[in-house]
Amino acid sequence: MKPRRSAGFAVLGLGMSALVACSNGDDVEVGAGTLQPAPPELLSYSCQEDATRSSSQAELDSSAPALRDSTHNVGAAVAAFRLDEDPAYGQTIAAQFNQLTPENEMKWEAIEPEPGVFDFTAADRLVTFARDNGMKVRGHTLVWHSQLAPWVEELVGPDAVREAMTRHIQTIVAHYRDNFPGVVVAFDVVNEAINVTQGAMGAAPQIYRDSIFYRELGEGFIAEAFQIAHDTDPDVLLFYNDFGVEASTGAKSTGMFDMVSGLVSAGVPINGVGFQMHTGPLDQGPNAADFATNIARYAALGLEVEVTEMDVSLCAIGDNLLGQELQRYRYNRIVSACFASPACRSVSLWGVADPNSWLNDNGCTQGMLTLDTLPAPLAFDDAYGRKAAWWGVYDALNGCTYQ
Ligand code: XIL
């Protein structure tokens, strides 16, 4: 079999290197250990034999392979201001992805900075871009404790909070229903409402995160938010989205599953759940098989699932050849695990090119130390060139699961 490309190294030593089989019968080299030059025959990234690693220029060439070529929905978080800053950013997004998520533009502080005063400028810029490029949009996010407009935090009493939440959801969902029919296909209605902590002095564990919504409305704010969104647009898909809930076991995963199961049995109009999947390059926390197990129990409730914010930080291992290859493997395994389920509607990466990642805001730190490496968590490099990670996603989208 003809090698698709030669990466010029192999992971050898420590007895941990491996030529792994792909589900389509081909082999891919991954592993952990020291980096050494490898004989070319060890390298057989051959899921797609005609694909070659290209220069950054070729990324923008319409004939270059693209993530959006597959039948799957594949998205990225996009920042409106970057579209104006750098044409290659928008060109890469339009060429590669068929879905986008506004990274910050639909958050409460951005879209309703003052009571009843909505500013759709930046969000509409993104939705227009998506529509013009044949892409769908995941609306993100209607009700969240973070990036909330300060005035919401100052509301007093359940009536005031309910009124603000209702107006907020109705106005945004109706805006996209009426002005961009069929483009915003889904909303993260509630984001990150679960935060399992031990109850005081033997009391039952507290599973909901403290927020103005929870404090004033109790856990019922979640069901209310979904109902308001559904009543405003019965066609848009409604998701609950969270992080640290990707595994099939553990307190937070269990808390979320119990909460979501409760919504479903109460007839709340929820269509699915989003797993953020901010993760690292090792196949753990959870591994892909356990993620698949978790997906299956939501699918059994009749829900859709999505990977909504995937990034694979290299802080722990370093942005080096080993890290990049493990990152490729991790992307492949997780994206494959999602699409192996018929319930998986889409996979999104939380950004496009490494320099755009939100993880750069904190860099790589260990305690007080700042490490001499970068998270480099995404699929494109500084020049919008495809990284090894890109191939991991591409292969997964095209049915090649690294074994
Ligand atoms: C992040 C953005 O990427 C940053 O630009 C912003 O400063 C903070 O929020 N979970 C979410 C996303 O649901 O909205 C967050 O996005 C990342 C964590």
Image (cartoon, grey):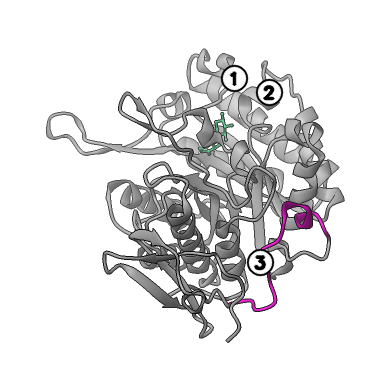
Looking at the rendered image, the quarter that the N terminus falls into is bottom right
User: Is residue 248 toward the left or the right of residue 190 in the image?
Assistant: left
The image shows residue 246 at horizontal and vertical percentages of 40, 54
Amino acid residing under circle 3: His
The image shows residue 307 at horizontal and vertical percentages of 53, 55
Q: Which residues are magenta?
A: 47-61
The image shows residue 88 at horizontal and vertical percentages of 78, 43
Q: Quadrant of residue 13?
A: bottom left
Amino acid residing under circle 2: Glu
How many other residues sit within 10 Å of disc 2, few (<14), some (14-19) or many (≥20)? Answer: many
Marks 3, 2: nearer the viewer: 3
Which residue appears at 65% of the width and 79% of the height? 49
Asked if residue 359 is among those painted magenta in the image, a careful observer would answer no
Q: Are marks 1 and 2 in contact (CB under 8 Å)?
A: yes
Read off the residue under disc 3: 72
Q: CA distance from mark 1 to mark 2?
A: 7 Å
Of labels 1 and 2, earlier in sequence is 2
